[in-house]
Amino acid sequence: MPHLNELQEKFGDKGLSIVGVTSEGSGPTEKWVEEHSMKYAYAYDKSKALFHGVGASGYPSAILVDASGNIAYLGHPGSITAEIVQGALAGALATPIYEWPKELSGAAKDMRKGDLAGALEELGKFGETHADITAAVTAMVKSRVAQLEKARDAGDWLRVENAGETLLKGLGKLEEATTVKGILDTLAKDKGAQAVLKAQKKVEKMFADDIKKSQFDRCEKDLHKICEEHAGTAAERDAKAGLERLKALRAS
Amino acid sequence: MRNLSFLPLLAPALALAAAAPFALPGSGVGDPLPEAELEGFTQTGATTLSDYAGRAILIEFFAFW
């Protein structure tokens, strides 16, 4: 799609990779790619595992994954604006790891595993030789910690829990791990935060599986209750989004 | 299976979710990208999805229409 060619052109060196994914055969796909002047990467998802795994339901559809590996957007590819892309670029690597010099294969391997501390340790072995890549990984670490702090400040404890544990593991013995541990400790000790987290998880669970029409009224009642009990918190915000979603389900 | 068979009707709500920095419950937004084995990477030096670690990735699911 030309729109995606443009996004790749504009943001490719700022941390965005575009991948077309199809379950069609390779012959017709190659022909199609050529006919449509598709400039970005593509790959095959024969079992449709990724398509179903992200909850997509039709073609064309697209997901935008931010530099931390979380899905930031799901919708029609044409509706992904430059602004939406920019929001997902925080901390993104300008040079993808598969373009790193061969001698950095150890660091690249650590990056694939999310082991940021390991990658920085590997990079450290080369002194100033790969200072640009070291700076990019360091910036990524700082960006992820900053995003976690932002989630904490917003009281989005579900996000803190989900992102925090993964980040803590990746940070290993880096000094930033102390900050992340501190944020997770706050969540563990703060009764108010725990209550919000519990309510957020309840909303998430409600929509994790198909909701039957007979359950709509019950869900709506539960969501309103969460809005009342957790007014002004991330749980209320999630429950309100849930009510919107329920409204759309009812209308369909 | 996620409850997303009504996706086209949800487009406005999803756009709202993306504009605001929070997830629409159950939409997959906010979740980590699930692990999946893709084959035959073309027009790129990448050979697996994990080669994009640290990059923002826009995945377009396409079929011929």
Image: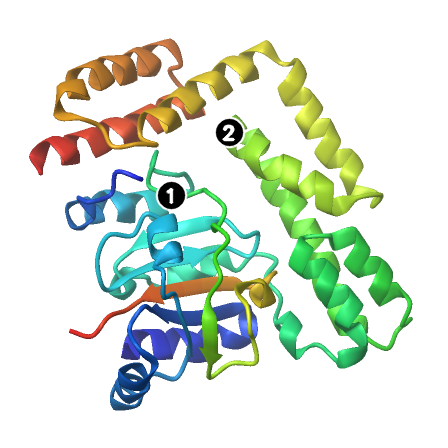
Q: Label 1 neighbourhood size at 10 Å, few (<14), some (14-19), many (20+)?
A: many
Vertical relation: A48 (above or below) A208: below
Indicate the secondary structure of the residue bearing disc 1: loop
Name the residue furthest left. A251
- The residue located at (53%, 64%) in the rendering is B49
Discs 2/1, front: 1
- The residue located at (44%, 42%) in the rendering is B30
* Chain of the residue under label 2: A
- Quarter in which the N terminus of chain A is drawn: bottom left
Q: Is residue B1 left or right of residue A115?
A: left
**Residue placed under numbered mark 1 in the picture:** B28
Q: Position of residue A164 (x, y in %)?
A: 63, 36
Vertical relation: A163 (above or below) A200: below
Residue type at mark 1: give it. Answer: Gly
Q: Position of residue A218 (x, y in %)?
A: 21, 14
**Residue placed under numbered mark 2 in the picture:** A158
Residue type at mark 2: give it. Answer: Leu
- The residue located at (74%, 31%) in the rendering is A181
Query: Which quadrant holds residue A163?
Result: top right
In depth, the one of A37 and A144 nearer the eye is A37
Q: Say yes or no: labels 2 and 1 on the same chain.
A: no
In depth, the one of A232 and A159 nearer the eye is A159
